């Protein structure tokens, strides 16, 4: 299973990035929903490598949404790419000797000598370009002599490629979220003064509750004809030692606050944490978030007494003065819709602003 650790200093040694037209506001905004990956190569190469490509990019996400893959694949040959997919947000290009002459626009960031070296290199050297055809676009390249060479290099580098794709998904999403936060800029200062760390709340989220150093923001919309809710909750509590960062302690603090804050539709019902075998297992990791030690939990919530449930992502951050823990959580509710991974990534992108 793919290991994802968002320390956001992703594989600097393995991935070399070229920035293209970063300041060119005339480029269109990249199309494509979060988590969509366009594969570009000669048709025969994709046919020859189909099994490896599927196993590399259609892996399930870790312990959060069951069999839901992190990426959705769109397969494109070189001709169709320029006419249909060139403004997509996330693209993976496999370049072999025979396709170089057909990929002039895609390979514009690289000199002929660089392309030749990358093709002949026996080891995979992952290249990356941004904003080539559209703003907020990320393109990853793998070079090889032929299908056999590309297969060997992809087998060696698929973890690095996935890490690059996933990390840029969050970073690009974060850039889009905060292009205009003017309507909610006030909250960053308020939260930081009260809790010790601030977080930038996107303008689509409305403040629903603020009391006793607890904040609750909600984004309400529809997806298709079904309601969709994304909620953000922040609160703080004392920090004594690392026992407070165990899953048991984090769950206890979560349930204590949410029992009184998040009520169900029926009297006496409220949100809690579930570990039922019906849902994916809890996932926990420790990381540094903008220099602050943090424990991240991904699990599932349920409403006690009502058949409602959904995924959550919770960050418990040690405050700079080491005296308090700041909890930031986002949780998702979509009735009758199974695919929730893009919304969880949006929450993770928001968490990048905690500082």
Image: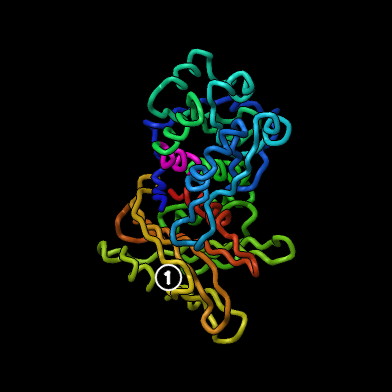
Q: Is residue 319 visible?
A: no
Vertical comparison of 107 with 264: above or below: above
Residue depicted at 48% across the width and 52% down the height: 59
Vertical comparison of 109 with 27: above or below: above
Label 1 SS:
helix
Q: Is residue 184 visible?
A: yes
The picture quadrant where one finds residue 24 is top right
Along the viewing direction, whichever of 31 and 192 lies nearer the viewer? 31
Which color mode does the image show? rainbow
Along the viewing direction, whichever of 234 and 272 lies nearer the viewer? 272
The picture quadrant where one finds residue 251 is bottom left
Residue depicted at 39% across the width and 32% down the height: 14
Residue 269 picture location, percent across and down = 55, 83
Using residue 110 as the reference point, say whether residue 77 is left or right of it. Answer: right
Residue depicted at 59% across the width and 86% down the height: 267
Which is the main secondary structure of the residues drawn in magenta? Answer: helix
Vertical comparison of 72 with 340: above or below: above
**Number of marks:** 1
Using residue 340 as the reference point, say whether residue 325 is left or right of it. Answer: left
Give the residues in magenta: 157-166
Along the viewing direction, whichever of 209 and 89 lies nearer the viewer? 89
For the residue carrying disc 1, how many other residues have a C-alpha within 10 Å: few (<14), some (14-19), or many (20+)?
some
Residue 296 picture location, percent across and down = 40, 58
Residue 58 picture location, percent across and down = 52, 50
Residue under numbered circle 1: 254
Along the viewing direction, whichever of 350 and 141 lies nearer the viewer? 141
Instruction: Indicate yes or no whether the magenta region holds residue 158.
Output: yes
Vertical comparison of 198 with 128: above or below: below
Residue depicted at 58% across the width and 39% down the height: 47
Instruction: Indicate yes or no whether the magenta region holds residue 237.
Output: no
């Amino acid at each position: 299973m793919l290991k994802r650790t968002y320390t956001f200093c992703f594989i600097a040694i393995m991935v070399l990035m070229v920035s293209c037209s970063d300041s060119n506001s005339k480029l269109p905004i990249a199309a494509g929903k979060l988590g969509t990956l366009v594969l570009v190569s000669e048709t025969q190469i994709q046919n020859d490598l189909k099994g490896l490509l599927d196993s590399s990019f259609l892996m399930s996400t870790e312990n959060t949404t069951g069999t839901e893959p992190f990426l959705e694949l769109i397969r494109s040959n070189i001709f169709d790419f320029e006419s249909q997919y060139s403004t997509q947000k996330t693209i993976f290009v496999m370049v072999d000797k025979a396709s170089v002459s057909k990929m002039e626009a895609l390979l514009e960031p690289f000199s002929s000598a660089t392309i030749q070296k990358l093709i002949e290199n026996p080891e995979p050297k992952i290249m990356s370009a941004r904003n080539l055809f559209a703003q907020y676009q990320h393109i990853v390249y793998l070079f090889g002599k032929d299908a056999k060479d590309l297969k060997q290099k992809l087998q060696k580098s698929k973890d690095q490629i996935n890490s690059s794709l996933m990390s840029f998904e969050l970073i690009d999403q974060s850039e889009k979220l905060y292009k205009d936060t003017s309507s909610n800029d006030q909250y960053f200062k308020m939260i930081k003064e009260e809790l010790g760390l601030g977080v930038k709340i996107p303008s689509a989220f409305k403040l629903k509750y603020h009391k006793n150093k607890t904040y609750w923001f909600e984004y309400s919309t529809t997806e298709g004809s079904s309601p969709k809710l994304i909620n953000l909750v922040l609160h703080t509590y004392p920090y004594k030692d690392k026992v407070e960062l165990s899953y048991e302690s984090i769950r206890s603090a979560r349930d204590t606050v949410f029992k009184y804050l998040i009520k169900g539709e029926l009297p006496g019902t409220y949100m809690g944490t579930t570990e039922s075998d019906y849902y994916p297992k809890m996932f926990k990791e420790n990381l540094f978030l903008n220099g602050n030690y943090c424990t991240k939990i991904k699990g599932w919530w349920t409403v006690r007494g009502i058949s409602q449930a959904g995924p959550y992502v919770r960050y418990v951050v040690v405050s700079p003065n080491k005296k308090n823990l700041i909890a930031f959580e986002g949780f998702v509710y979509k009735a009758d819709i199974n695919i929730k991974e893009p919304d969880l990534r949006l929450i993770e992108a928001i968490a990048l602003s905690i500082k």
